[in-house]
Amino acid sequence: MAPITTLLLSIFAASVSASIQNPSMSPAPPMGFNNWARFMCNLNETLFVKTADAMVSKGLLAAGYNHINLDDCWMLHNRSSKGELQWDPTLFPHGLPWLADYVHAKGFKLGIYENAGNMTCGGYPGSQDHEEQDAATFESWGIDYLKLDGCNMDLQNGRSYYEEFKYRYSKWHSILSTLKRPMTFSESAPAYFSPNFHLDANNTDWYRTMAWVRQTGELARHSDDIKVYSTLPNGTFESGGHWDSMMNNYGMQVRLARYQKCGFYNDPDFLIPDWLDLSLDEKRTHFALWAGFSAPLIISAYIPDLTDSEIEYLTNKDIIAVDQDALCEQATLVSQDGHFDVLTKNLANGDRLVMVLNRGNQTNNTVIPLERLGLDSGERYKAKDLWSGSSTTIRRGVVEISHLKSHATAILRISGAGRKGEKLAVTPTGMIFNTFSLNCLAASPASHHRSPISFVTFAACNAADAQIWRTLSNGRILSLNDDGLCLAAKEEKVIVTACSHDVTEAKRQQWSYGINGNLVNKEKELCLQEAEKGAAVLTKCGIELDSQVFGLPGGVTVREEL
Ligand SMILES: *[C@@H]1O[C@H](CO)[C@@H](O)[C@H](O)[C@H]1NC(C)=O
Ligand SMILES: *[C@@H]1O[C@H](CO)[C@@H](O)[C@H](O)[C@H]1NC(C)=O
Ligand SMILES: *[C@@H]1O[C@H](CO)[C@@H](O)[C@H](O)[C@H]1NC(C)=O
Ligand SMILES: *[C@@H]1O[C@H](CO)[C@@H](O)[C@H](O)[C@H]1NC(C)=O
Ligand SMILES: *[C@@H]1O[C@H](CO)[C@@H](O)[C@H](O)[C@H]1NC(C)=O
Ligand SMILES: *[C@@H]1O[C@H](CO)[C@@H](O)[C@H](O)[C@H]1NC(C)=O
Ligand SMILES: *[C@@H]1O[C@H](CO)[C@@H](O)[C@H](O)[C@H]1NC(C)=O
């Protein structure tokens, strides 16, 4: 253990060019192209040249998509006699330095793929124990971005699987930090500890990995790959599963909002605009949600054949501005009931973003009170529909979403109706949910209203007021139910009760939230825990326990220390 700790400390002390230590490495999430989901190992120079040309002619580069990234299978199966990685000269007849020059001349950056273990997922040479040499090779070729996968990890020096990942990615981080050429570091490590990867495992190592990749790179590929474009033996597109795959990655992303910060982005994988079994509404939903997350917008598609309607949504300036917003916030859930997901986030100019996803199978309507969006029902606001570009005044204190089609997403930018440039006063408001069980913290039903206190439980999320919480900067957490009772400790139980000004009482009503996802009560420094049968209790804080890690509304203060 000791040598690892020492190594990491020295790495952190020396490093200058990564992630949250240096947000200027990647002040906004990257946008661009990657071949994997669409072409997998069928990549070659012609594809990248045509892609770059089409990204220029179709306006994608001008819209901000300025990365061209290679994925696996670009290399030869053997290293050179000097031990260097070699591109496959059949696939890349002019070589990768030539390709780098070609795309650089057009204004793109070039990204490459390698693997932290000893073989890539596709069976090509991995970088394990060749890290310095491979970094130098990439630098000499003019590479700007490295996606480092995690297949075939050889466990060395008694390290566990988890420790080997931490060791290898940290080693890459320290090497990249010494290069003259800045290289964006996309880390796939968390995906190897994600709930879907290890079905029998708990989430502890996933969370722990998310915490350290945040110190060692710019991007966290945190869960499954988006389901690839595959064809049947007769060459026709294999339909099915792509919407579910996108929703799966969305469902992983919402659990990790607390980690995101300018310079470091959660990455739910590629946009897939030319998949034949996704409707235009579904593709637009994919784009809008990813933008609301300030996630990387990396397109995997055959760019030359993208249609005008696909290019139109991919280049929507207002939605790209949301993705690239200077606050880098990931939108978080206000509510979720199986029909609608409502998400919000703050924007740098003081506006508030609202997204409403219709997960149902039919066109539907919904009405969202302004309090749920962290706004004041007595104030005047206007809302800009970022799809149509039209603005309307918000009336009667509610945002009305009408005729939202199945699997479509409404995306609105809310600003003050008064003075221009006015920053909205926002109270972070929304679900508090266990990111393992996905159950929501719920105040007791209103039938208990006359009792002075009510207990709090965990229950399936249903978008009721009792499951929506306002988080104040003084550490108070108020239910939207019952005229705003405060979440409080009572012995080892958690209750909602009248908010108090008494000093001792106040500590029982104060909570702090950490990067580890723990919600800690100030009075006894105990952690909120989802216990048996949905009971909400207070217990000693453990290390990233499934029962103690929660997602809170975005904008709440997050303690950095673990
Ligand atoms: C290059 O790759 C594309 C996409 O897989 C393929 O359609 C094309 O035939 C390949 N071209 C060459 C010259 O290999
Ligand atoms: C690659 O290297 C292995 C041994 O490391 C050797 O057996 C094999 O022939 C080499 N393949 C090629 C194509 O050079
Ligand atoms: C990679 O590591 C695995 C697991 O330890 C080992 O079995 C294999 O021989 C190694 N392969 C190479 C090419 O080093
Ligand atoms: C969860 O995973 C961690 C890390 O692998 C392990 O230490 C812990 O025992 C596991 N907890 C349970 C309850 O299985
Ligand atoms: C290709 O195969 C699938 C599945 O067998 C079949 O449904 C489809 O009609 C075939 N398409 C063509 C063009 O032959
Ligand atoms: C939509 O339809 C699918 C497939 O028929 C079903 O599994 C799902 O539960 C439905 N969703 C809703 C919200 O009704
Ligand atoms: C519309 O959504 C509501 C929940 O907000 C749900 O109760 C209702 O069944 C949905 N209607 C349709 C037609 O899906």
Image: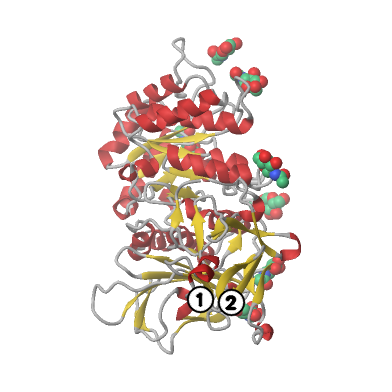
Circle 1 is placed at which residue position?
500
Label 1 packing within 10 angstroms: few (<14), some (14-19), many (20+): some
Q: Which quadrant of the structure image shows residue 527?
A: bottom right
Q: Position of residue 102 (x, y in %)?
A: 30, 34
Disc 2 to disc 1, how far (Cα)? Answer: 9 Å
Q: Is residue 256 above or below residue 177?
A: below
Is residue 276 in view from this perspective? no
Amino acid beneath label 2: Thr
Name the foreground residue: 45 vs 217: 217
Circle 2 is placed at which residue position?
497
* Residue occupying the point 48% across, 40% down: 213
Residue furthest to the left in view is: 420
- Please report contact status of discs 2 and 1: CB closer than 8 Å, yes or no: yes
Amino acid beneath label 1: Ser
Q: Is residue 134 above or below residue 311?
A: above
Q: Position of residue 363 (x, y in %)?
A: 58, 78
* Residue occupying the point 43% across, 86% down: 397
In the rendered view, does 530 fall on the left or right side of 301? right
* Residue occupying the point 32% across, 63% down: 348
